Image (cartoon, rainbow, N blue to C red):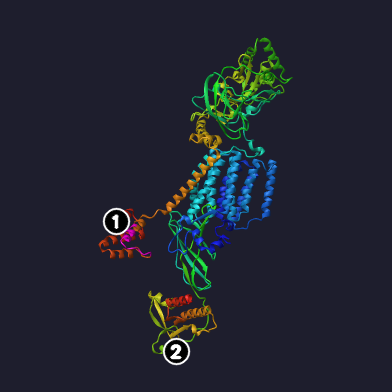
Amino acid sequence: MIGRLLERNPRIANWLYGFTPPERGVVELVHRRVYIVPARLGWYFGGTLLVLLVGSINYALSLGFALTFLLAGLGLVGMVHTARNLARIAASAGRAEPVFAGESAQFRLYLDGRAAFDRPAILARHLASGSQLVVDIAPRGVSEVVLAVPAPRRGWLPLGRVMLETRFPLGLFRAWSYIEPDARCLVYPRPERSPLPPYSGEAVAGALHAPTPGSDDFAGLRGYQRSDSPRHIAWKAVARSEELLTKQFAGDAAAELWLDARLLPHSLTLEQTLSRLAGWVLAADRGGAHYGLRLPGVEIAPARGDVHRAACLQALALYS
Amino acid sequence: MNHPLAPEQRSVGARDLAWLIASLVLVIAPHALRAPWWLTLLTLCLFGWRLYFALNRAPLPSRWLVLGVAAVAMLGVWIEFRTLFGRQSGILLLMLFAGLKLLETRTLRDAAIAVFLGYFLVITNFLYTQTIPTAAAMGAALFLLTATLIGFAAPQRAQRANLRTAGLLLAHAAPAALALFLLFPRVQGPLWGLPQDAYTAMTGLSETMSPGTLSSLALSDSIAFRAEFQGAPPPQPVRYWRGPVLWDFDGRTWSIGPGFLVDFAPPRGGRGSYRYEVVLEPHNRHWLFALETAASLPERARMSFDGQIVSGSPVRARMRYDVASVIAPEPQAKETAGTLRRALRLPQGFNPRASALAAQWRADSDDDAEVLGRAIAFLRQGQYVYTLEPPLLGEDTVDDFLFSTKAGFCEHFSSAFVFLMRAAGVPSRVVTGYQGGEANPVDSIITVRQSDAHAWAEVFLPARGWVRVDPTAAAVPGRIESGMARAVPQASELPLLMRPQLEWLRGVRDRWEAVAHKWNVWVLGYNPERQRDLLSSIGVRDADWRTLTAALFTFLGAMTLVLLAWSLRRLARPDPVQKAWRRFCRKLAARGIERAPAEGPRDFAARAARALPAARRSILRIGALYIALRYGAHATQPGVARLRRWVRAF
């Protein structure tokens, strides 16, 4: 009930949790943001203490009192240490590589312990998806947490709220904190396999005059350029010469290929259209084609390589 | 939902199980020595069985098998003790359940409950003994159990680190434990009836005395009480610690009989006055011990009509009280006729020879004092032997002792003497208690042991009232002068440490007992009274439980805050290099050159140098040193100092 109330009134939630999402940069878990309650074992422990106390009183056992009180002190100190295990951790989000819709986005969180002691057994859980991981942070160390968050739809996928929880050292208390770092992952449309469209006439004409590199026939080696696809690197030649070389191909398929939304049937919905186009981009890239992308209001000039592929897919992901 | 930190969802690993078993073995070790051998063996087998399952990753035995083992073991305990709910049998069952619990321990939650059971088993050890070695052993067990519990919360962590954390936590918990120990409102137990066998182990004088009672008690080296005198203690021959007074004789056994309490009237006059503190070991009876003759009573104690000091409830925990005594006060020659009649009563038909002897004395004497003189002379000249192994006596115990066996312990002498006095018409009674006691050379506290148990007599003389007569001293003078050890012939079996040859061992014992006495007084003897004394000594009078609770919560709250502040401060302490750099950035920001969030120190220093050409050298120098210190292999102390100096000068 309270959870639903907070969902509907984000301002109350922000006031309660002590921050306004999303948080830019490094998020420090100040102690105001660390909550702590007894875990179920803590209640059992309390019950044990009560029995010990009654036994000590009943039998007038001085050492029984000493034991009971030492354990009570231990519980109290355990509470402080549990809170300390989370307090002042600096959390920051790393880069999340783009994924296709239907896959899982791999969000990276970096937990910087910033302390001379280690912080064992810290659970990071993505609240919306339930994806979770337990990490230990070494003294003055940084631990990486990779949270796999399902990405069902194209567009930007924000990370959302992440809970950090610990029960170390005694397991009697449960301390937790919420963070919502400003991290997002680009989600490309789900690619749909379909035959590539025919090459446009202008491209074929160009091919007659100046041979443009394609991927059908091997035409020789040249020096590697950063935009070249790793698939075209001549690994065997690299092994001989210790220099990156790219295989060059020639052929008709090297002609310009326009991936145009207008080539697809109008009966398709926007999402289906984008899926087809994403499939084409992948197929054209795999084929080493020189391809461009055309959507209503968007045009990306023909090119090739990973950067071009990413630009095309991003345009599809963010198209509205 | 799957929760990787929830103990009920995580299975217990072999390492954690091994630690759990090791710490439980340490906890139950003292019980195992007291338990029947088969129960110890069974518990250890259960532990070993569980470890075997863990190491072979075998599935645990079925619940029915575990229940079957439990039923058989409970039957065995019942056969052994004829009860399941006595103290001894209950504790042994608990020990067994620790083994059975492990057999069904699958998750870390069960394992943690086994740790809590271990904490509980620690306290059951204290029911038997609370000595310093026990405390040390159980402290070690507590440490191991805590490290085991920490291991459950961090299964990936090295156990050495967990041990260190356990030590840290216990050290942090110590102040809170001390505050709770001193300030927690104490109530006097017990809260409900205790099992029947709760106090069987306590030794001491009893309400009755028959031949053999004291001589068997005298073989015990255990301590009856300790007394700490303000100033020098009285000499050994006058140290008569008065205990129960025995009135009624049935031919063999003397017993206390009915009595009543009177208002205490301090005695007048007397040689020497002594104030002292007694720490009395529990003996499960009402009476308290004081030197004859008590000049004041301990708090909340009463005096009986025959001069016993009694407390309101049986002494079941070690008790401390202050008392004062005088030696040989002015006589008080008043006694009721009924009491005097009781002091003459004898069973009919026993001991004809002794009765005849007493009648003879009566006929030959003018008054009671002369009868007394004849009796003492008779014992002195009778060549009686003082022994811890007296021969068995027949139906007429007094006749047999006086005329045929002629060897006995103090109960024989006092019993025969009082019989003779009563038969001669002199009112008399048997007094039991302790005689002497040994001064510890280390802290000069007098330790009185069960082996100092003694019985003497009191006779009523019309002019002087009740007079103490020690028939043992009359017959065997050495007993009172130099203690039992030299009075008893060497062939007799003495308690080990009373043998004169082992002087050096006694030196070690004296030192140890001085420490143990402090332990008894300050740790074990800390009770509601001590708590009141302590509080009034720091100026808090009449502290009730509300005041104590408030003080306690204040202290605990403050301690928690201090601990929290300390742990956070340790985190917040910034790196000095970083601090100097931030200061440098603030200084530049004041001149309008603000560092962009993504700007590295090299770029920023270069930009600042371009913007402030006058300070160019200084800025670049600081930037380069900062980079070297922050990202270099190691920051040297002079380097850090130089950076701070440069930034300050900037």
Say if labels 1 and 2 share a chain: no
Q: Which residue is mark 1?
A: B646
Q: Which residue is mark 2?
A: A201
Residue B614 drawn in magenta: no
Q: Is residue B140 above or below residue A312?
A: above
Residue A113: x and y in percent read 45, 57
Q: Tag 1, which chain?
A: B
Which image quadrant is residue B527 in?
A: top right
Q: Quadrant of the N terminus of chain A?
A: bottom right
The secondary element bearing badge 2 is classed as helix
- What amino acid is found at the position of numbered circle 2 in the picture? Gly
Q: CA distance from mark 1 to mark 2?
A: 70 Å
Regarding residue B93, the answer to whether it shows in the image is yes
- What amino acid is found at the position of numbered circle 1 in the picture? Trp
Q: How many marks?
A: 2
Residue B499: x and y in percent read 55, 28
In this orientation, which residue lies closer to the viewer: A218 or B612? B612
Residue B111: x and y in percent read 58, 53
Find the magenta span and give its range.
B583-597
Residue B587 drawn in magenta: yes
Residue B136: x and y in percent read 53, 41
In this orientation, which residue lies closer to the viewer: B140 or B172? B172
In this orientation, which residue lies closer to the viewer: B247 or B36? B247
- Near mark 1 (Cα within 10 A), the count class, few <14, some 14-19 or many ≥20, is some
Residue B603 appears left or right of B58: left
Q: Are marks 1 and 2 in contact (CB under 8 Å)?
A: no
Regarding residue B51, the answer to whether it shows in the image is no
Q: Tag 2, which chain?
A: A
Q: Is residue A22 above or below residue B119?
A: below
The secondary element bearing badge 1 is classed as helix
